[in-house]
Image (cartoon, rainbow, N blue to C red):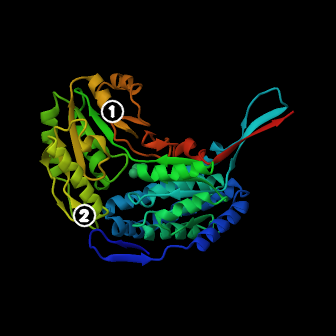
Amino acid sequence: MIKSNNPYTQEELYNIEELNEKEINQSIEDADQAFKSWKKTKFSERQKLMLNLAETLESDKKKLAKTITQEMGKPLSQAISEIEKCAWVCEYYTENAESQLADKIIETDAQKSYVSYEPIGVVLAVMPWNYPYWQVFRFLAPQLMAGNVGLLKHASNVMLSAKKIQELVEKAGFPKDVFINLPIKSDQVNKVIQHPKVKAVTLTGSEKAGKAVASEAAKHIKKSVLELGGSNALVVFKDANIDQTLETCVQARFQNTGQSCIAGKRLLIHESLHEEFVDKLITKVKDLKSGDPNDENTFISVMAREDLAEELEKQMQKSVDQGAKIRIGGKRDQAYFEPTILDDVKPGMPVFEEETFGPLLAVTTFKDEKEAIDLVNQSNFGLGVSLFSSDIKAAEDVIVNLEDGAVFINELVKSDPRIPFGGTKTSGYGRELSDDGIMEFINKKTVYIK
Ligand SMILES: O=CCCCC(=O)O
């Protein structure tokens, strides 16, 4: 059985039976059957349906957002923004998929030679709970537009959202079975990957889940895309605009109650700014409104599960034992973890080395640019980094030295349908969104006519 409780009220939300092997195989066969005709549809047809999907998301956003809030405790206003972003990615690929996948003529000694971009078939998406709709839509929108079909294995605490996503696709008028939600457990994922009709897998989740999925896919010579954890640095140089940077750092760390792969988890601050910046940060963090996620004014609420809050508490406590100092917060009540700033953090401490998936910011000082770069790159993760400076040229010169998948200057690391999203090192490989995302599950077919 797959069970879940509302993390804020503790009430039981569901207790559903997972699919058995026969049902899983039937779903895969159904998806493959749907692929045979879906891949032949014209872009105009796909565009019409994708736009319907965007419109349905927009018109149902309040209702859909409530499910997110119920299942994983996301404050309602942020859940509504998440649904709006899903509509945006649908619109983006409605407008761009056709040109992104147009044949590419290449001059050779042939009469004609070109690359044709063709869908590969059934793709499995293994997705996490932290953005229950967005993580799925950033896979679903490009892949349906490309002519692929999707299977979803969603996290066990957001099965209502998963079901609603399939319903939304059907309501928009897409043919049956081009997108199928599989209510299954993690230990059933390998069976899906192994099935000959499943051609590839994409996973957003932990390093452990990434290793398991990627090795199973590799055993069967199937492509995988992995979007794993992160420990993004927020690097504040001594010439940064303090007020704007403070605002951005608070958003970067505390939105979604800190539960995001791309959150700015490590604040690296020039030693000359340290005292002033951290004092002002404490004031800002004190002002964050914590409470009931159903209240539209709430910014911080419970974490998605109590065990996640416990894990964060352990990381904090071990770091404190090693010399870090709690400047604000630090207390936990079941799944609620106070917004926390941990100062005097040094490499080697858990909050520096590991991903902290909750509302805790780790503060480390640096003396000069070289030390800042070393501290950024010292992480095993490589999702993204934010640099704050009023000298854009100097900040741009730093970019080449950074190992991450993204560098944002004077902005938090964020995803946007128009630009690629993905990491390096243990943050994974492959890219989502933009031209790069739609190309991940494509047969780039070379055509040569003598
Ligand atoms: O855990 C990853 C969260 C990604 C959120 C986003 O794309 O904005």
- Provide the residue designation for mark 2: 335
Relative height, residue 199 to residue 415 (above, below): below
Q: SS at mark 2?
A: loop
Relative horizontal placement of residue 321, taking residue 445 as reference (left or right): left
Quarter of the picture holding the N terminus: bottom left
Task: Please state if 65 lies on the left or on the right of 152 as rendered.
Answer: left
Q: Foreground mark, 2 or 1?
A: 1
Badge 1: residue crowd in 10 Å (few <14, some 14–19, many ≥20):
some
* Residue plotted at (20% across, 60% down): 290
Name, please, the residue furthest toward the front: 219
Q: Nearer the viewer, residue 277 or 45?
A: 277
Please name whichever residue, 220 or 382, is drawn nearer the observer in this view of the structure.
Answer: 220
Quarter containing the C terminus:
top right
Mark 2 vs 1: CB contact within 8 A: no
Q: Decide: is 244 above or below 70.
A: above
Left of 297 or right of it: where is 327?
A: left
- Residue 336 drawn above or below residue 105: below
Q: CA distance from mark 2 to mark 1?
A: 31 Å
Look at label 2 and name its amino acid: Ala
Percent x, y for residue 126?
50, 58
Q: Position of residue 316 (x, y in %)?
A: 20, 49
Q: Residue at x 45, y 56 (%)?
A: 134
Q: Earlier in the sequence, mark 2 or mark 1?
A: 2
Residue that numbered label 1 is attached to: 378
Is any atom of residue 421 visible in this view?
A: no
